[in-house]
Image (tube, rainbow, N blue to C red):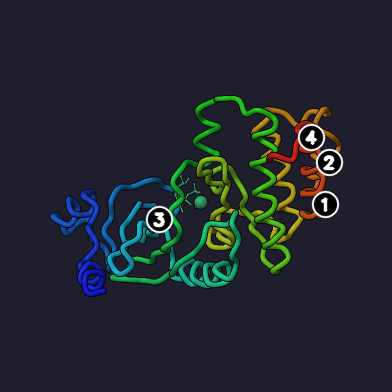
Amino acid sequence: MIEWQTVAAEPAGMPAEVEERLKDPRWSFRDYVLIRQIGEGPIARVFRAWRRETGQFVALKLLRSDRVTPPMIERFVAEVRAASRLRHPNVVRIHRVGTCGGTTFLDSEFVDGESLQVRLQRGEPFAQGAALRLVMQAARAVVAAHAAGLVHGDLKPSNVLVDGSRAKVADFGMWRVREDVREANEAAADVRSLGTLLGRLLGSCGPDLGRFVREACEGRLSSGAFLDALERRLAGIEPSPAR
Ligand SMILES: Nc1ncnc2c1ncn2[C@@H]1O[C@H](COP(=O)(O)OP(=O)(O)OP(=O)(O)O)[C@@H](O)[C@H]1O
Ligand SMILES: [Mg+2]
């Protein structure tokens, strides 16, 4: 018992990559240690970071102060707060949002993988089963969001992150923050995006996939009906229960 207490009281070892960064204060932000930049979007940079308080690696999005205005920041914080209610295995989990020293940040689950954008850019073809499974997972996230009264609004390959074979959707509601994104704020737009996403992964929206993809792309299906059709399609090509 005493031995257990002694071991538990010792600080957990710090990963070497964190120790290295701690030597240079430019890699520190609030209670985070920035490890490396993992991405860059139109209004933000995303870092893999270590949160000292929890000893966890997270994805830290730092808004670029030269690209955002105070109203955008206000909308960003409001959207992130709304989206943080969503807890789902296919949704990137939001930890917290805030502003420090004039920089607005979003701390979320670090997805150890790559975005579908990166996968598409590599040009490797997707097998039909793999594409259906990835889009099905994104569709599950969208169905859960719609049931909670949230829409994504900007469902594109860079916002679908893949860790192994699990897809996780990031940036729910973020389209509202940007003044240059004009996607409609409606559930049908998410279904259109899912149909388009499937078409991009498979290189076509060909008739062999079924009418449902065309109907989705035309905004004529609900997210639930699209998910059902995907599941039926996957069962058709992979009849075994192992999926
Ligand atoms: N939680 C995360 N875990 C791992 N990588 C992430 C995470 N969030 C974002 N990224 C990476 O950072 C990149 C940039 O993300 P960011 O959201 O800033 O830009 P974007 O998706 O291209 O544009 P938008 O601002 O319109 O969403 C993503 O494409 C992805 O590769
Ligand atoms: Mg994004």
Mark carried by residue 239: 4
User: Which residue sits furthest top?
Assistant: 124
Amino acid type, callout 2:
Phe
Amino acid type, callout 1:
Ala
The residue shown at (41%, 54%) is 44
Which one is nearer the viewer's eye here, 235 or 18? 235
Q: Is mark 1 within 8 Å of ligand 2?
A: no
Mark carried by residue 212: 2
Residue 217 seen in the figure: no
Label 2 crowd (10 A; few <14 / some 14-19 / many >=20): many
The answer to whether mark 1 and mark 2 are in CB contact below 8 A is yes
The residue shown at (33%, 47%) is 37
Residue assigned mark 3: 59
Q: CA distance from mark 4 to mark 3?
A: 37 Å
Mark carried by residue 225: 1
The answer to whether mark 4 and mark 2 are in CB contact below 8 A is no
